[in-house]
Image: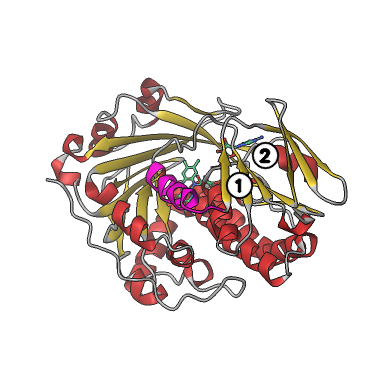
Amino acid sequence: MTAKDAPVLVVGGGIGGLATALALSRKGIPVQVLEQAPEFKEIGAGIQLGPNVFRMFELLGLTKDIFHWAAFPTSLEMRDSITGESVVEMRIDKLYERYNAPYGVIHRADLLNVIHDACQRSNLITLSTSQKVVAIEDDGSGITARTDTGESYRGAALVGCDGLWSTVRQHIVGDGKPVVSGHIAYRAVLPTKDWPKEYRLPKMIIWAGDKTHLVHYPLRRGELFNLVVVFHSDRYEEGWDTYGDPAELHARFADKCEPVRELLKKVDAWKMWVLCDRPPIKNWTKGRITLLGDAAHPMLQYLAQGGNMAMEDAVCLADTIEVSGRDYAAAFQKYQELRYLRTARVQIMARVYGEVYHANAVAREVRNKVLREWAAQGGIDMSWLYGEQPELPRVDNVPLPPVTQLVS
Ligand SMILES: Cc1cc2nc3c(=O)[nH]c(=O)nc-3n(C[C@H](O)[C@H](O)[C@H](O)COP(=O)(O)OP(=O)(O)OC[C@H]3O[C@@H](n4cnc5c(N)ncnc54)[C@H](O)[C@@H]3O)c2cc1C
């Protein structure tokens, strides 16, 4: 085996890592995925899928399976969580006409399973679990990754897809811990039968209030409902995937309108996330080692794009490797050059959208007025985010999605 034919080592088997493995395998490149957890598993709830990521699904041959599992809400409604009034409602099914791709929502586990199944069907991908990468060496002719079980893996190059707390990032960038935003998310998923009938709508509803919001939408073809609650708190420093305290949540929302307080009571077991990001950087590559997804450009969730960006990265990376004739060092430089401004813009704008969601006092009134004006003009132009990108292969048309049926 020549150095060029050695596998690419992918550290981390989340959305970014498995999408990378799949994208590389479709270019004929062998891949070894190293995941620290005992299984490939996504914890958490729903994830929003912008029109931009549907083009990536199409390129990776995943559209049919994603359509099977996703839900496609028809509109996005913002309500004021203090007065309960509807601020604005925008048709998201109409985004298809504008961007030639739909807007959908999916359970994270379903998304990961779809990508994982596709990886398993490829004889170029080796998937290994319980392999936490603890050390990386580049000896000039290849990369060696060592794991906490004492095993070592040899590859032609390495892609760090190991998320917000990336070990590979510390090797390349060395910028320490992520930035704690002071925003906390509580998430839960309920069977639709346990969700109040009046809210069993094919809509995404955001109840926006000062320094808080609640969002709910259907998942899995309408069989489930997803709830995300966010509030500001400096009580927490770091950590994720722990149980949330319902008493704290109810106290934070005590001044909100009755429907919001009632909806929060529908959930007994919340999972909690301490939301973090990092300032954008433009160099996340060192020789034949690079970063992808949250490891490269973690962002707050207010634009619902972290996973979407990881999928775009994966497609772009596979393309640049192919174009370079598997000159990994050159390809990784090119990939970073093609991606950093786009991902930095999303990181920055996600923070701005957080301010918009949680505006109070006069800022809240300005927000409501501006949103209504935009809606009256046919909605805000999001081409910069949802439109075709020059660094990504062209996709002429993603098929029309199915209509989401809600279980009554
Ligand atoms: C509340 C919330 C809501 C969100 N909503 C959306 C949304 O609607 N749409 C959207 O697109 N994005 C959303 N995101 C962002 C999205 O979840 C992330 O951007 C996405 O999961 C990043 O994927 P990743 O593969 O880069 O990292 P991760 O999902 O973090 O995966 C990293 C993987 O690497 C493994 N790993 C870590 N260290 C090692 C190691 N040393 N060795 C081996 N394996 C390792 C981990 O176990 C994990 O499996 C949201 C995030 C949050 C917190």
Q: Earlier in the sequence, mark 2 or mark 1?
A: 2
Disc 2 CB within 8 Å of nearest ligand 1 atom = yes
**Crowd band around label 1 with a 10 angstrom C-alpha radius: few (<14), some (14–19), many (20+):** many
* Residue 294 numbered tag: 1
Q: Quadrant of residue 246?
A: top left
* Residue 2 numbered tag: none
**In the image, residue 196 above or below residue 397:** above
Residue 52 as seen in the image, left or right of residue 270: right
Q: Position of residue 70 (x, y in %)?
A: 32, 53
Q: Quadrant of the N terminus?
A: bottom right
Q: Quick one: 303 or 163, which is closer to the camera?
A: 163
Q: Are marks 2 and 1 in contact (CB under 8 Å)?
A: yes
Q: Is residue 116 magenta?
A: yes
Residue drawn 63% across and 32% down? Answer: 131
Q: CA distance from mark 2 to mark 1?
A: 8 Å
Q: Which residues are magenta?
A: 109-123
Q: Quadrant of residue 270?
A: top left
Q: Is residue 129 magenta?
A: no
Residue drawn 41% across and 44% down? Answer: 108
